[in-house]
Every structure is written in C-alpha cells, then in structure tokens.
Amino acid sequence: MSFDLVLFGGTGDLAWRKLMPALFQAFRHGTLPEGGRIIGIGRDDLSDAQYRELIRARFDNVELAKRPKPEEFERFAGLLHFLRMDLTQPQDYGRLATTLRDRNAQTVVMYLATAPDLFTRVCEQLAAAGLNLPNTRLVLEKPLGHDLASNREINDVVRGVLDERQIFRIDHYLGKPAVQNLFAMRFGNALFEPLWRREHISNIQITIAEDMGVEKRGAFYDKTGALRDMVQNHALQLLCALAMEPPINSHADAIRDEKLKVLRSLVKWTPETLDQHVVRGQYAAGNVGGQLVPGYREEKGVDPESRTETFVALRAEIASWRWAGVPFYIRTGKRLAAREAHILVNFREAPHPIYQAPRNSWNRLVINLQPRDGVQLHLLAQGQENRRNGAMLEPVHLDLDFDKRFGSERVGAYERLLLDVIAGRLNLFVRSDEQEAAWRWVEPIMEHWAADTHGPRPYTAGTWGPSASSAMIARDGFCWSEEC
C-alpha cells in the first residue's frame, strides 16, 4: 500500500524524539508498508539531503538499541523528503498539493505536530487547497484546546473539513503495550472480569510520575499545567480502560462508546469535593538523583510569580452499578521521587480471615506502564514459620515482565499508533465526544482554581508531592503504594 506521511513540524522536538524513531523501528521490523514517503514540513530552507542529515544526527540521541546502523539509515533515508512551508501562507499549501498529486499515493496522512493554535488554520488551508480527499487521514496531537470551548472550536473546524473516520486524535498512552494488555487481560480472559467490580475491588490508583522538570518547555508548560497536560487526556483514558463495560466487539466505535459512558458517569464536582478531593502542587528547589535542581518558578520561560500546577492528585467516583462507592485516585506530577507510571488495583480483604497476615498485605494487581512494562499479581501464601495463634501468611507475587516475555517482538507506543493510522484503525484513538466529556468534567476544577487565592501547594523536588495528597487518600483509610 503506497502512502505519503506529511509531518507538519518535521524539524520539531516531537518529530525527532518520538516520530522519526518510531517510523524507523517500523521500517526495521518490516511492518512499515512498502511504497511509503515521509515528507517533513518546516520553515527552514533545507534540501532533501540536508533534512536526511539532520534526522541522522538526531538519531545519536536515542537509546543505543534503537539507533540505526549506517546501512540501515541509508535505506530509511530514501523515504525522507523535505518541503519548506510557512503554514500561515495559503500559496504554500498549493505547492504541497502539487507534491502529493505528482505521486498520487493510496493513503495520505497529515500529522499535525505543531503548536495547537495552528490546528484550525492548517485544516482550513488543507481544504482550500483541495487536500481533504477521501484518502486523507489527519492526526492531531494534544493538547486539543485549553478548555471545552476551544476544544469544540477545533473539532468543529476539523469535522467541517473531514469525516470523523478520517480524524485520529492521538493519545500515546493508549499505544503502550501494557495498556493494550489491560484490554486483553480484561476482555480476553475469563479470570478477572467476574472480580472487576465493587464487590471485590476496594480502590484503584493511577500514578503517572516524572522525576524531570519542565526541561525546555517552560513557556509552553506554564500555560498548560499538569491538569491539562496529563489528567484531562492520559489519566482519564486510563481510567476509562479500567472502568468501561465489555464492548460488544473489538471495533473502534464499540470500544469508544463504552469509554464515553464512563466519562459521562463520573460524579460531578461540588464545592465541597473540589476542596477535599483535589490537590494541586508546584515543585520547589530540591534534590533529584543526587543533583540539586531549581524550583519551578526558577525554570527558564516560567513566570516568577506562576500559579501553574506541576502536580495534581484527585479522587474520582463513577456512578454505576459496577463501581458505586469505589474511589479512583489519580496523581501525576513533575520532579517527583521517581519516573514511574503504574495502575494499582486493590482488592478487598478476605471477608472472614482465618490466617494471620502482615498489615497492608491485601491482594492487588499492579499494571506497570513505565519505565518497565508488565503485570504483577500480589497474593498471600503459606509461610514456613508457625505462630502460636496459627500460621502466618506471607506476601508473594506473580510477575509478567513484557520485556522478558516478548523481547524484540514488542512495539513502542508511537510505532503502534502510526501503523494504525496508515492502516486506518481507529481503536486506539480518541473520538471528539470523548474529549468533550473529559473537558466537561475537568473544567470545574479549572474554574475552582482560578477563584482560589492560595495557589498551588509547594512540594520539594524529589518527593512524592504535597502532604495533602497523602491526607486526601488517608481519609478513606487507604494509602499510596510507596506509603503502605
């Protein structure tokens, strides 16, 4: 299948850090369809040869196992081309149209790895140049708007140009192998689904922690914050995967219909729950990995008086028969104690314990997302030492490490998602009504913070965030994983 992948922002950070390495891995694995062409779009005046050399040099920054050998890159470079464009100039889209018509590929993928405020303009100009054809697919990176109104504005423009089936709103967390295996674990096995409900699960925790700061993205991040950057999209998509009902089949709309039901079932915020069940923080100077690091307000590009949150912890509930009364805890932040993303499913204690067991040793399922991918099932087993009042149980766990089990067969998130776009598979992409429902639930938090004169709570870099986060979960009698 011949395809053209047009990469708007082809010299940008996302292109060389994520997209080009993912496309190369697909090329190396033999899964990238033959007859492909990758066209980088940017304002630089580069020839094809100069663009290829730019990408080759950037590959020196990726991990060693994913770097191409010289002969591999030579073959991959044959797919790379460059077109200079100013995205604000209508005549430049005419040159793109000519470039694409000359080859007439079966599928044309337009990937907008640009500033979000360019999305609507690019889409309008693509339509004006006659590039919104039936074989066109459009990929939109997050953030898609900064609130519900701006999200609707972008989606209205895009839907006026292309059909919904041609629009791929990407959330790279949905491409992670562990997240895909969450769907497989729930809906491909008979073991977990009968237990996946309020009668057996006491609480669920989603943690997405980063030990790095804002790096070179200070100016962007200061206008975005952790709630928009991580909770509204990544964290809520993970919550949907955990809480959704089994779909009728594996088709895209069947899956997305069930995710939408979860988002619409989230219990709405009240002034009381906004005060008690939402914590925002901002990192201060501290120590990470033995190195002194500055506070958020000292980062380049950040307002010295910034009230932008770098940490969010919240408690959500779902109003449904399956999940009534089960709290879902979400926390995410920068400059935390570790780079770690995981989902913790805590099961209820045995209704009538007849054995002694260590404190806080209930059954739990841990789904690791990063830095390692895998699943751990924590159980209790008979210990060897007898006690006066009976045998003591000891914690044990079953560990499925996806790296060890699948090895070189594993496919990275962006590699999976890019191949799905080219193939036209929408299963792992977000529909517009999902996005709107997520924004509708998040907006009251944003409005509450805008009226709050106290600002985010400070926390020392290298810790697990403000102590109020621990107090929030402790009020329910639970604790975060590192505290138990």
Image (cartoon, grey):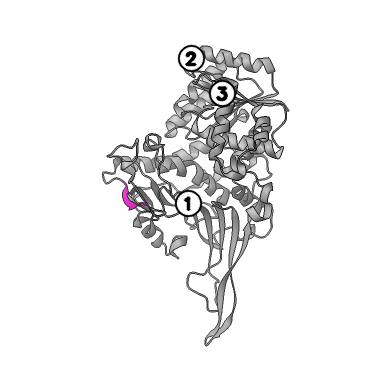
450 with respect to 338 (left or right): left
Extent of the magenta region? 456-462
In the picture, the disc for residue 50 is: 3
Tag 3–tag 2 contact (CB < 8 Å): no
What amino acid is found at the position of numbered circle 2 in the picture?
Gln
Please, what is the three-letter code of the amino acid marked with disc 1?
A: Arg
Q: Nearer the viewer, residue 293 or 231?
A: 293
- For the residues labelled 2 and 1, the Cα–Cα distance comes to 41 Å
Q: Earlier in the sequence, mark 2 or mark 1?
A: 2
Res 426 seen here: no
Determine which of the numbered discs, if any, sits on residue 89 in the image. 2
Residue extending farthest to the front is 70
Could you tell me how far apart the alpha carbons at marks 1 and 3 are, in whole angstroms? 36 Å
Residue 330 location in percent, x, y? 46, 51
Q: Which residue occupies 57% across, 13% down? A: 94
Seen at 49% across and 58% down, the residue is 326
Closer to the N terminus: mark 1 or mark 3? 3
* Residue picked out by circle 1: 339
Residue at 32% from the left image edge and 47% from the top image edge: 456
Judging from the image, what secondary structure is the residue with disc 1 in? loop
Q: Quadrant of the C terminus?
A: bottom left
